[in-house]
Amino acid sequence: MKAAANDFLLYDRETGLYREDPEQAVRDDVEKHYWLHVGRTIVKDWRLYVMLIPMLLVFLFWRYFPMYELLGCFKVSDTVVPVSDQLFSGFSYFKRLLVGGDSLSQNFWMAMRNTFLLSFYGLCFGFPMPIILALFFNEIRSNAARSVYQVMTYLPKFMSTVVMTSLVTMLVKQGSLVSQMGIVSQALVKLGIISEEVGNSGLLNNPGFFRAIYQISGIWEGAGYDSIVFFAAIIAISPTSYEAAQIDGANKWAQMRYVVLPSMLSTIVIMLITRIGSLLNIGYEKVLLLYNTKTYVTADVISTLAYRTGLSGGAGTGIASAAEMMNNVVGMLLVIGANTIARKASNTSLY
Amino acid sequence: MKRKLEVSELIFKILSYLFLTVFALLCLYPFVYAVSASMSGRHAVEYSQVVLFPKEVQFEAFAMMFQNNMFWNAYSNTLFLTLYGTLWAMGVSILGGYALSKKRLLFRKTFNFFLVFTMWFSAGIIPQYLNYLQTQTVFRAVGIMDDKWLVVIAMGMAAMNIILLRNAFENVPSEIEEAAIVDGATEFQVLNKVYIPMSKSTIATVALFFAISRWNGYFWARQMISNQNEHPLQVFIRLQLEQYTDPEQIAGWNRIYASDSVIYALIVCSIIPILIIYPFIQKYFAKGTNAGGVKE
C-alpha cells in the first residue's frame, strides 16, 4: 500500500493498521485526545483565560455561593451557622408558608398578592406611559426643544431611591400641630381628591394609597427614561412612509394607526414580554423605604416580608429563604418563558 | 415643499406640546420645591407658604449641614465607594467581557450561561446577607477591617454590563486584532491599544452605569457597614429623614428654619454633583439603552 500525504491520519498507532475512513479517524483522534487538546489550547492562550478568572470568581463568590446558602430553606437552624452544619428539615417551611394557617402563612399569601398586584398595576399604568411620551416626543420637530423636554423627563431616573422616596415622604407627609401636611397632599385636598382628615393623617400611613403612590412615583421616576427605547423605534421609521401615507390622504390618526404603531410593534411586544417576565421581581428597596407598619396590608412584598422575618428579629432565616425561593423560582420560570416567547415571536431574544 | 398642516395634525401637535410641558414640569417640580423649601424660613415651610419660590430666605439649614462632620464623612465615603467601586467593577468587567467576546475561547457558551443565569435567578436578600456576613468574617480575618471594601469588592457587579461590553468588543473588526498580533502585540496590548480605544463610548456608558449605581447604593451599605463613620451619603440621608420626621426627636425645635428644611438641604446637596455632570452624561445613557444587549 502506497502512503499518501495524509495517510498518517489513517494510521492507528495501537493496532499498527491503517483505518478506512479518514474523517472517522480524525474524529476518533480528537475524541481520544480531547482533554489534551483543551489543555494545549488553554496553555497556548493562557492570557485569555487569566482575564476571565476575576469575573468568574466574583460571580462564584457573591452570586452562586448565596444560591448554595439558599439550601437553608430545607434546613433548620436558630442561629446563623453554615448551611452544611444545619439539620435537614425537608419541605416543612414551604408547607408552613403555603398551608400553615397561622399568621405567617397569611402574611405570605398577602405578600404574594401584593407583589403580583404592584407589578400588574405597573404593567397597566406604568407601561403605556413611556410609549405615549415617545409618540409625543416625535411630534416636536425642533431638536433643541425636544432635548429640553427629554433632559427634564429623564432627570428623576438619576436620583437614588433614597432621594426619591425621601421627597415622596416629605411631599405627602402628615400634618401635625406645628406644621401642615405635605404640599402634594394639600393640592389633592384643594382639588377635592382626598379629604382633609386623610391628608392630615399622612397618605403613606394609609394602606389605600400605597399602590397609587408607588405607581405614580414609578412613572415620575422611570417613564421619561423608558421612553428612549420606544422613541428610537419611532425615529427609525423612514420619512417616505409618512409621505406615502399623506399622499394617500391619511390624516394624523390614520398615520398613527397604519405607520407608527406597526413600526413600533416589535419593540412594544419585546418590552411587554420582558415586563411580564419580571412580574415577580419587584424592587424591594423602594417598598422598604416607603412602607410602614400601618401599610403592610397593601405594601408588604415577598422580599420585604423575608427581610423582616429573616433579619430584623423574625421567625428565622430558613423560613424567609423558603419564601424568597418560591418567589424567585416562579420569577425565573416567567423570565425564561417570556424570553422563549419573544424569541419565537420576533426572532429577538434578550439574553 | 412645505405642506399645510391638516387639522388633525395641528391638534395632535398642540396636544403633545401641552402634555409634554405639563409632564416635564411635574417631573421637575419636586426638585424645585426641595430647593425652595431648603432655603425658606421656618414659618413659610411649616405653614406651606412655599409653593414655587423660596420665602423668608435663609441659608442656616445649609450652614448647619456643612458644619456637621458626619455629613462630610458621608460624602467622602460615597466618593470612595463610587471611585473604587467603579474602578474595580470596570476592571473585572472589561477583562471578562473581552475574554467572552473571543470566538476561540473554549467553553464560551458555558461561561456565557454562567453569567446570564445570574440575571434569571437571584438567591434573594437572606442568602445574600448570610453570604456577605461570611465574606465580612473572611475579610476581617485577612485584615481588611474597613467594611467599605466589602461593599466595593463584593457588591454591585452586573451581568448586563459585562454583556454590553462583550457585544461592543465583538463589533471590533478582527482584522485589526490580527494586524496587531502580527506586529507582535501581546493579548493585554491588543486589549489596551486596540479594543479599549475602539469601544470608548460603550466603556464610558458602562462606567457611568456602575458609577451611578454606586453613588445611589443604599440597602446593602446600610446592612453591612456597621460603623457610623463609614456610612455613605444615602444611608446618612435616610437616617436623618427617620430622625427629623419623628415627632419626639423634633419636639423642642427652636431654630429659624423648619426641621424639614434640613432634609431638603441634604437632598439638594446630594443631587448637586449628579446635576452638574448630568448634561454631559445624558447622551451616553440614551446610547447605552439603545445598545441594549439585544443580541446573542
Image (cartoon, rainbow, N blue to C red):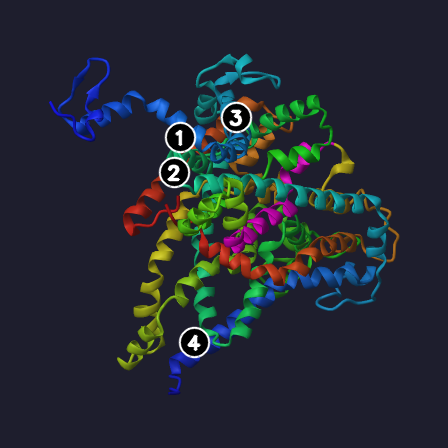
Q: Which quarter of the image is occupied by the N terminus of chain B? A: bottom left
The quadrant of the picture occupied by the C terminus of chain B is: top left
User: In terms of image quadrants, where is residue B33?
Assistant: bottom right
**Which mark is on residue A41?**
1
The residue indicated by pointer 3 is A65
Amino acid at the residue labelled 1: Thr
Residue B6 placement: quadrant: bottom left
A169 to the left or right of B258: left
Front disc: 1 or 2: 1
Tag 1 and tag 2, C-beta contact below 8 Å? yes
Labels 1 and 3 within one chain: yes
Percent x, y of residue B62: 82, 56
Give the labeled residue for mark 4: B12
In the rendered structure, the answer to whether residue B98 lies left or right of residue A179 reads left
**Looking at the image, residue A185 lies above or below residue A205:** below
Q: Secondary structure at mark 3?
A: helix
Label 2: chain? B
- What is the C-alpha distance between the residues marked 3 and 2? 29 Å
Numbered disc 4: secondary structure: helix
Amino acid type, label 2: Arg
